[in-house]
Each structure stands twice: as structure tokens, then as C-alpha cells.
Image (spheres, grey):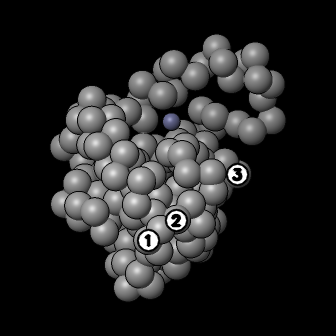
Amino acid sequence: MKKVDIKTVNEVNEFIASIIKELCKKHNVEKPIVVVVRGLPMMFSPFFGAGKIILNSIVYAFWEIDRESAERILRFVVAHEFKHYLQYLAGEIDFAITDAVYEAIKPKIEEAAIRFAEEYSKVSSAEVSTIFKRLFEVAAKTYSKRLPMMEVNVDV
Ligand SMILES: [Zn+2]
């Protein structure tokens, strides 16, 4: 099983940091507290919670398999989670709300995040799923499930 190169980790982290930096500048906000890329389980479930943007370290494998596609996916995913950060700052989402309340507002929140991500990345969510499926298939077959877990340093 293949392991991710440390050079890849650095490149991906730099790429993620540059997106965050650009979005923070554009929207005149401070950087999210932390951006973490974590491994295990090998599934794609990026999320935003309590000032943290969490991405899955499978993106490192994607980067080695097909860098251009990985960049497109990352732009979309980081922008999507960043929009949730903006929603959080605007008080549109609040971590004190109950699951029932969140379920009720979720479609509107998600729709806005998808629109934001599509606009920023110029990639449609349909295209993201197609690219993801293709890269995931390769990554799952070739890469060790133990991918690195990293905190991304964003200097804003
Ligand atoms: Zn979302």
C-alpha cells in the first residue's frame, strides 16, 4: 500500500492555506481558528465546526493521483466549508441549536454553501462528485488507510 509523500502534504497544505487566505481577504474576516486535515476513516466528509474547518486527508492521495482534479475538488470543498464559517460569523448557524432546528435550516444553509463553492471554484457540485468517485476508487485501491493528519498553518 502506497504512502503519501511528505512533499505532497506540504504542497496540499500550502494550497489549502492559499485558498483560505484569499477568501479571508475577499470577505474581510479573520482566518478560521484552525484548518485540520485528518485521516481515518477514508471517507470524504469535510465539515465546519466551532471555528474549525476539517478536511479529509484523502485529498493528499488525490493530489498524487491527479493534481489538476485534486485542485478543483479542493477549491470547491474549502470554499464550501468557508461559507459555513461565514454563516457562523453572521449568526446564521449556531452550535447551540438542537439537531431538530438544524435539520430544518440545513437545506437553506447547504444550498448557499454549494452556490458559494460553485461560484468560487467554477466547478459544479455534479462535477465534484464525478471527480471524487473516480479518484476515490484509485485511492482506496492503492493507498494505505493511514494517511497523515495535519494542522494547516494559515498566515493571514
Ligand atoms: Zn455543507
Query: Residues at badges 1 and 3 in contact (C-beta under 8 Å)?
Result: no
Q: Quadrant of the C terminus?
A: bottom left
**Earlier along the polypeptide chain: callout 1 or callout 2?**
1
Residue 2 image point, x, y percent: 44, 71
Q: How crowded is the residue under tag 1: few (<14 C-alpha within 10 Å), some, or many (20+)? A: few
Residue 66 image point, x, y percent: 23, 61
Residue 2's label in the rendered image is: 1
Q: Is residue 99 above or below residue 30?
A: above
SS at badge 3: loop
User: Which of 126/4 is in front?
Assistant: 4
Residue 50's label in the rendered image is: 3
Q: Is residue 115 above or below residue 29?
A: above
Query: Residues at badges 1 and 2 in contact (C-beta under 8 Å)?
Result: yes
* Dot 1 beta carbon under 8 Å from ligand 1: no
Residue 11's label in the rendered image is: none
| Real-space CA distance between mark 1 and mark 3, rounded to the nearest whole angstrom | 33 Å
User: Which of 156/28 is in front?
Assistant: 156
SS at badge 1: loop
User: Which of 64/77 is in front?
Assistant: 64
**Nearest-to-viewer mark from 3 and 2:** 2
- The residue where tag 2 is placed is 144
Would you say residue 153 is visible in this rendering? yes
Amino acid type, residue under disc 1 in the picture: Lys
Residue 70 image point, x, y percent: 29, 57
Amino acid type, residue under disc 3 in the picture: Ala
Amino acid type, residue under disc 2 in the picture: Ser
